[in-house]
Image (cartoon, helix red, strand yellow):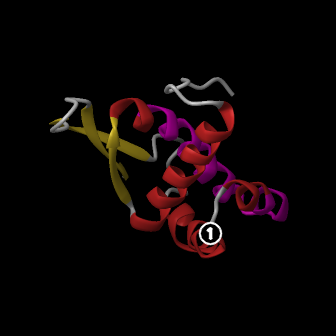
Amino acid sequence: MKYGKLGRNSGHRKALFRNLVTSLFKHGKIETTEAKAKEINKIADKMVTLAKRGDLHSRRLVLAYLLDETVVKDLFDNIAPRYAERSGGYTRITKIGPRRGDAAPMVIIELV
């Protein structure tokens, strides 16, 4: 997969994405910068697509990426069935204006 670098080395970037995607599925929505949201949007959609398949292999792939097993169980049992008839676009990004301090463009990314 091709990602934006976000000014971080590869290990830090991977950990950041894993944390953000886990938090997104745990809380339903998170507030972050626009650049980070656009990157985790792709990953979150792939995780929901895997969860919709529902087989053991896809569960193990998701477990290898997400940090919390309870979030994986919730993703497979509650979140994925909601999108059974939907073929993509499981997240929504809403702009909320610049961050105070460094004026970074902030957004809310949420599950549709």
Taking the image as shown, residue 83 lies to the left or right of residue 35, namely: right
Residue 54: which quarter of the image?
Answer: bottom right
Residue 85 in sight here:
no
Task: Tell me if residue 69 comes above or below residue 87 in the rendering.
Answer: below
Q: Tell me the residue at 35%/54% (across/down).
A: 30
Name, please, the residue furthest toward the front. 101
Residue 63: which quarter of the image?
Answer: bottom right
Residue 83 spot, x, y in % from top left:
50, 56
* Magenta span includes 67: no
Name, please, the residue furthest toward the right. 57
Q: Tell me the residue at 25%/37% (across/down).
A: 106
Q: Tell me the residue at 61%/47% (across/down).
A: 15
Q: Nearer the viewer, residue 38 or 19?
A: 19
The local crowd at label 1, few if under 14, some if 14 to 19, many if 20 or more residues have their Cα within 10 Å, is: some
Residue 51 spot, x, y in % from top left:
65, 58
Taking the image as shown, residue 13 lies to the left or right of residue 28, namely: right
Q: Secondary structure at mark 1?
A: loop
Residue 70 spot, x, y in % from top left:
60, 76
| Three-letter amino acid code at the position of disc 1 | Asp
Task: Tell me if residue 13 comes above or below residue 77 in the rendering.
Answer: above
Number of marks: 1
Quadrant for the N terminus in the image: top right
Which secondary structure is most common in the magenta stretch?
helix
Residue identifier under label 1 = 68
Residue 60 in sight here:
yes
Q: Which residues are magenta?
A: 38-60
* Magenta span includes 59: yes
Q: Tell me the residue at 54%/36% (across/down).
A: 42
Residue 5: which quarter of the image?
Answer: top right
Taking the image as shown, residue 56 lies to the left or right of residue 106, namely: right
